């Protein structure tokens, strides 16, 4: 909610939450950074008149799995790992630039909570950023 309100995400994208989102533990800034960076990237790289983001969660044995799926241009397979590197981003023509730190920060936050993050995507079919985070005991 905080990211949606503070960043005015609703004016820039249509966000749908499907199902129930679990309560997960982050530091305040950590959780905000994860949600903010993933949604900001979806909006920034959108090639549609209105960016659409769907957030879903799945409960697993020891972790929660949360996904953010967008309707953007997609990401080619060869960049799926590279986009999580510090100072790397992929622009709409597939060129890697040395500007981004957002997804590297997200990866560091997620991994610090015994989770992992990855992307499932192909050009022309949007992207799903999926992460797991250890359940709070």
Image (tube, grey):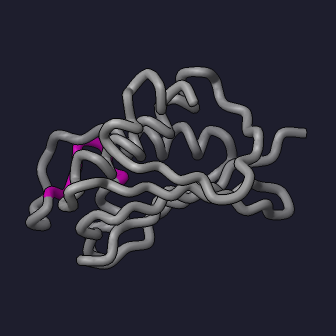
Quadrant of residue 100 within the rendered picture = top left
Return the residue found at the far right. 137
Give the answer, above or below, for where 45 lies relative to 37: below
Q: In x, y percent, where is residue 123?
A: 25, 77
Q: Is residue 49 left or right of residue 16?
A: left
Residue pictured at 74% horizontal, 52% vertical = 20
The foreground one among 128 and 5 is 5
Screen quadrant of the C terminus? top right
Q: Is residue 101 left or right of residue 9?
A: left
Q: Is residue 125 magenta?
A: no
Q: Is residue 116 left or right of residue 113?
A: left
Quadrant of residue 59 within the rendered picture = bottom right
Residue pictured at 39% horizontal, 61% vertical = 70
Quadrant of residue 128 within the rendered picture = bottom left
Q: Please indicate, yes or no, whether residue 127 appears anywhere in the rendered image.
A: yes
Residue pictured at 38% horizontal, 27% vertical = 7
Give the answer, above or below, for where 14 lies relative to 77: above
Q: Is residue 95 left or right of residue 83?
A: left
The foreground one among 38 and 54 is 54
Q: Give the magenta part as a residue range.
A: 84-91
Q: How many marks?
A: 0
Residue pictured at 34% horizontal, 69% vertical = 126
Q: In x, y percent, where is residue 2?
A: 54, 25
Give the answer, above or below, for where 65 lies relative to 21: below
Q: In x, y percent, where is residue 86?
A: 30, 43
Q: Please indicate, yes or no, whether residue 116 appears anywhere in the rendered image.
A: no
Q: In x, y percent, where is residue 17?
A: 59, 52
Q: Main secondary structure of the magenta part?
A: loop
Screen quadrant of the N terminus? top right
């Amino acid at each position: 909610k905080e990211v949606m309100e503070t960043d005015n995400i609703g004016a820039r994208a249509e966000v749908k939450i499907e199902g129930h989102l679990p309560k997960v533990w982050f530091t305040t800034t950590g959780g905000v950074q994860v949600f903010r960076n993933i949604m900001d990237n979806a909006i920034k790289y959108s090639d549609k008149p209105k960016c659409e983001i769907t957030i879903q969660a799945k409960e697993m044995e020891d972790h929660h799995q949360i996904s953010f799926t967008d309707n953007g241009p997609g990401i080619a397979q060869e960049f799926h790992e590279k986009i999580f590197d510090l100072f790397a981003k992929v622009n709409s023509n597939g060129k890697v630039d040395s500007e981004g730190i957002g997804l590297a920060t997200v990866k560091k936050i997620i991994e610090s909570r015994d989770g992992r993050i990855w992307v499932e995507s192909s050009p022309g079919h949007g992207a799903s950023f999926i992460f797991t985070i250890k359940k709070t005991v």
